[in-house]
Amino acid sequence: MTRVWQWNRPVTVREVLEDIQRDRSIAYTTVMTVLDNLHQKGWVRREAEGRAYRYEAVSTRAAYAAALMNDSWSQSDNPAAALVAFFGMMSPEQREALTDAVRMVQGPENPPSAPPPENPANPPESAEPEDTEEPADARNAGNPEIPGTENLGTENQGKPANRPPAQNTEGGR
């Protein structure tokens, strides 16, 4: 799938074969079988061109990644807690990208609700320095608005986060 997404246009088995063969040896029939399997699974569509087919991705890589995330999230017995844990694994750059994406989805008609303006004469009692960054699971631990978060962040306080290894979700070669 990665090769089909990289081309970003309908491709033949021969084109994918030659692209892969720059990195390693592979048989024409192997590439043909993989593309046929992807077609049978609905990942690519194909059109006949002479005696060959041209294969094109049905969806973008971003749409595929979104579907994987949605599928995993919807299978959780506690989606809110799963999101909190997921956000806790994100780097600052990923959280910024998420914030930007939420802004795009909400659009100008529905801007995110702004926090109330601070009154310099009466600063909040629990004001924390702005440059401190704690994991999202610690910030949301015990949040009564998010069921299932009562134990998040408490077992590893003062310890670095233990994150699972990244999964390869490219769906192919």
Image: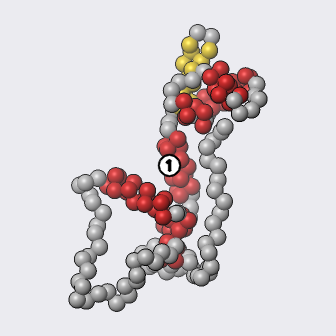
Report the residue marked by disc 1: 66
Q: Position of residue 114 (x, y in %)?
A: 28, 69
156 relative to 61 in the view: left or right: right
Task: State which quadrant residue 48 falls in.
Answer: top right
Residue 34 appearing in the image: no
Residue 111 lies in quadrant? bottom left
Name the image quarter holding the N terminus.
top right
- Pick whichever, 78 or 85, lies toward us: 85
Say what amino acid the circle numbered 1 marks. Ala
Lateral position of residue 60 relative to residue 38, left or right = left
Q: Position of residue 83 (x, y in %)?
A: 50, 64
Vertical order, 146 against 17 (above or below): below
Q: Nearer the viewer, residue 96 or 142?
A: 96
In this rendering, the answer to whether 160 lies above or below 110 is below
Q: Would you call the spot at circle 1 few (<14 residues within 10 Å), some (14-19), or many (20 or more)? A: few
Residue at figure coordinates x 61%, y 43% from the top left: 170
Q: Position of residue 39 (x, y in %)?
A: 60, 28
Q: Is residue 28 at all visible to an observer of this figure? A: yes
**Element type where label 1 sits in the image:** helix
Q: How far across and how far down the image is residue 131, in percent?
A: 43, 76
- In this view, 130 is above or below 54: below
The residue positioned 61% from the left and 72% from the top of the image is: 161
